[in-house]
Image (cartoon, coloured by chain):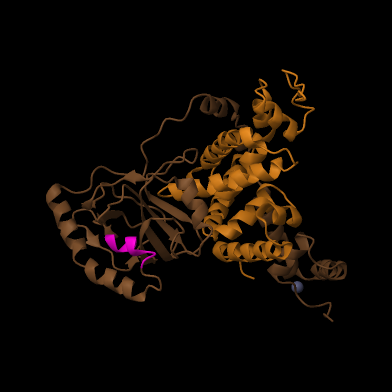
Chain colours: A orange, B brown
Amino acid sequence: MTKLEVIPLRPDSTERSDDDLMRLARAGAAGAFEALVRRHQTSTLRLCYRYLGSTSLAQDAAQNTLVELYRYVPRYEPRGQFPALLRRIALNQCRMLVRSKRRVDPGVDAPSPAEDPEAEILRAERQRELSRALSKLPERHRRVIALRFGADLTYQEIADNIGRPIGTVRSRIFDGLKKLRRTLGVES
Amino acid sequence: MRKPDVHASRDEWERYLEGELTQSRAAELERHALTCEACAAARDETRALFDDLFDVPPRLLETDLVAGVLARIEAPPVRRAPRWIFAPLVPLAAAAAIAFAFVIPWGDAAEEFRAKSTSPAAHAADDWVGLTAFAVEPGRPPQPIDGALAPDQALAFAYRNIGPRPFDHLMVFGVSEGGEVYWYYPAYDDASTDPASVPVRAGAFDLPDRVTHALPTGPLHVYGLFTREPRTVRAIEALVRSIEPGERLPVEGAGQHVLHLEVSAR
Ligand SMILES: [Zn+2]
């Protein structure tokens, strides 16, 4: 006999785990996927921004990521790996966006209006330089830097995410920082 | 043992901020920075860099993606015209010149391949196919590329498909030393799609578009992959990950021609 899973039609998104929401989305529960998008959009935007260095590109990449996530719904295996999956998709989308563009100019962000416009302009300028420097990093460095600073992961979490030993993660982070520093013209 | 008065490098301050130093070395650095202005400045600058790395524009975090995402998953995406593809490249007369230009070098290359190959039968299909890359500059006829190109070089391609049983589909893509794939055919600009090979005919033809990528410097292996059935971008990217850049792709029954180019700054 087949055991039927009981699925409430209006999932309470704040209570449920990502795995539950993916399962509910698979079963066609209204609002389940939307709840996942709401829950993870900010972290996805942050990660994409740190990789791409531009607000508009990060918005594109994050939207692509969440659309791509939807393709995983029918075959998703709930094993508590949701955040790792989402980050992997996000970094792949960033990578694809970078190479599908003829040019990625990270210097297109205008400073946002703020209480202290001068500080905001300086901050935007620093971000611009940083983005330019990040865009020159080899992909393997750019990826770990984005995971470390854009997703605020520990080295172990990054290691799990990229499927490499923690020692590799550590050396890529510090190599990446060193390359960044050189591009930014910081003396050592 | 380190002397307590040894200055800290930037590298060490980065490790300090990442919590990667031993407790005793971290304490030593803190003490040292109390009396060494240069080191205190280096620490502060490193901290500022880390702050910038964690920083995101407030505007970004106000973005609401929900409506856009739901609209896209409810309506299948419309294929947009690729941004990096331009109108047909050359008039027919010039196309004929291209065909002429790339027919000549082939015969010898095929012979050479046969001579080197350890199992000649296995890749015999490669002898009947070919790919030539052309540099396209405004106001000049396309020039065949024989090795080096600039990262932003506009490229056009011509193919040859002249076997007794010609192939029906083609993909053209570059693979960098880092394993990144740069698609020329099919057009691939929308990451949510998975486009398939383009159809090809028997004979020698030039392909219509000129395509520019921001290529990384270093070796670039440009594959012409001829198959009987269409393949998809994602399936091929998965195969690319299984080989070293520049190696033959494990695609049964395919004809392949790989151009080994070098990308260097102008
Ligand atoms: Zn000092």
- Which quadrant of the picture is home to ligand 1? bottom right
Residue that appears at 74% across and 64% down:
B15
- Residue B73 vertical position relative to residue B53 in the rendered view, above or below: above
Front residue (pair A55, B8):
A55
Residue occupying the point 33% across, 71% down: B113
Which quadrant is the N terminus of chain B positioned in?
bottom right
In the visual, does B81 lie left or right of B14? left
* Residue B223 position in % (x across, y down): 38, 58
Along the viewing direction, whichever of B105 and B83 lies nearer the viewer: B105
Which residues fall within the magenta stretch? B121-128
Q: Is residue A155 left or right of residue A107?
A: right
Instruction: Count numbered badges in the picture.
Output: 0
Q: Is residue A129 above or below residue B127?
A: above
Residue lying at the far front of the rendered structure: A1
Residue A16 screen position, x and y as percent: 78, 29
Q: Residue A115 appears in which quarter of the rendering?
A: top right
Q: Can residue A100 be seen here? A: yes
Q: Is residue B88 above or below residue B27?
A: above
- If the image is split into quadrants, where does the C terminus of chain B sit? bottom left
